[in-house]
Image (cartoon, rainbow, N blue to C red):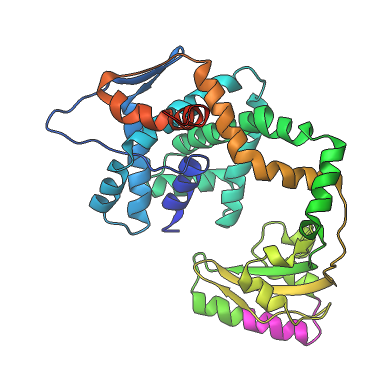
Amino acid sequence: MKFFRSAILLTAVTAFFVFPAFAQESDIKIVDEVVAQVNDSVVTLSRINREVESIVEASVAEGKPRETAKAEIEAKRADLIANIINEELLIQKAKEYDFDSTIEAQVNQNFVGKMKELNLKSLDELFAEMRRQGVDPDEIRALYRKQITRDLILQQEVDRAVFNRWKAREVKAYFDANKTKFTKPEMVEVSEIFLSFERRNPESVKERAKQLVAEIRGGADFGTVAADNSDRPEAKETKGRIENELSVKDLDPLFATALKDLKPGQISDPIFVENAGVEILKLEKRTAASSEPVFDEEDVRRAMTIEVLPEERKKYLIKLRKDSYIKINDRYRAEVAPVLYAEERKADVGKNPGK
């Protein structure tokens, strides 16, 4: 599990804002200071430094030299401050909604998902493993909570409004103009057996996978073999069956290739997934692709929304900034303000192209 620290930190810290953090070093060591006031809250240097340390450690865990990681982060320091200000605005806005129970449920789901991914038996075991690798579960919980809060407020304030704003005639017009987007892709239903490399000799796992394939092809029941051998926590109940129908075009090429020539009822050769384990897939059903477009209002609305969402979210953040009190410390204003208000400047230039 040597990549545990980097994976969980990078997921939690960078899931919404993609800019790296930064660290400042100088002969004068400032213990703390207010970098920006955002309405009735402040963004402090210590908060920035905590995020810096998390991302630096994650980069080092991925094999990057510490000095290289610091240098890359330093180059993006204005972006980080701007992103944290935007983040603070979203978190403040979320206080107007009763999101607490939803946020906590999703945070817990994230931990349970990580527990299952690592084939651990309990959250206590997961937290112990995190601490063993120098990761504070409370720190990760706080990062998850911020990430989920940002996502929820954007979904509530932007995504939902955009999805619902299209008139019926606009939806139909978009469908008529983009029919190739709404043809039905090739779909498959599959079952799986997953054998993890975790705490095992990979070569022994590979050999075991070959033995299971031979047993199933020799007449053993796939569901029984999955229940007895798969490392998926739910395998005993599902017997390896994956609930949802899958679009072939969205599959990892590794799995799409393995399924390509199978007929329903057949199983794949062992599929070796680097640093993870071995998959054995059974094709349960295949539905051929269709070139005939199918009108589904929700699918069309979703496609229309996805096209405009990046710009709509930018507009929303512009409005949040406009309606808020933001004061950047003089020490940081010259580098941060141009980044924070970049979209506003673009809008001004668009209105006054002669400027």
Q: Quadrant of residue 311?
A: top right
* Nearest the eye: 246 or 200: 246
Q: Main secondary structure of the magenta part?
A: helix
Residue visible at 77% across and 31% down in the picture: 165
Q: Position of residue 235 (x, y in %)?
A: 73, 61
Residue visible at 36% across and 26% down in the picture: 337
Q: Is residue 108 visible?
A: no
Q: Is residue 137 left or right of residue 100?
A: left
Does 269 appear above or below 57? below
Locate the C terminus and report the quarter of the image it occupies: top left
Q: Is residue 354 left or right of residue 70?
A: right
Q: Which residues are magenta?
A: 209-221
Residue visible at 57% across and 44% down in the picture: 123
Residue visible at 49% across and 67% down in the picture: 275
Q: Quadrant of residue 110?
A: top right
Q: Is residue 182 visible?
A: yes
* Nearest the eye: 70 or 110: 70
Q: Position of residue 280 (x, y in %)?
A: 68, 74
- Residue 217 on the magenta segment: yes
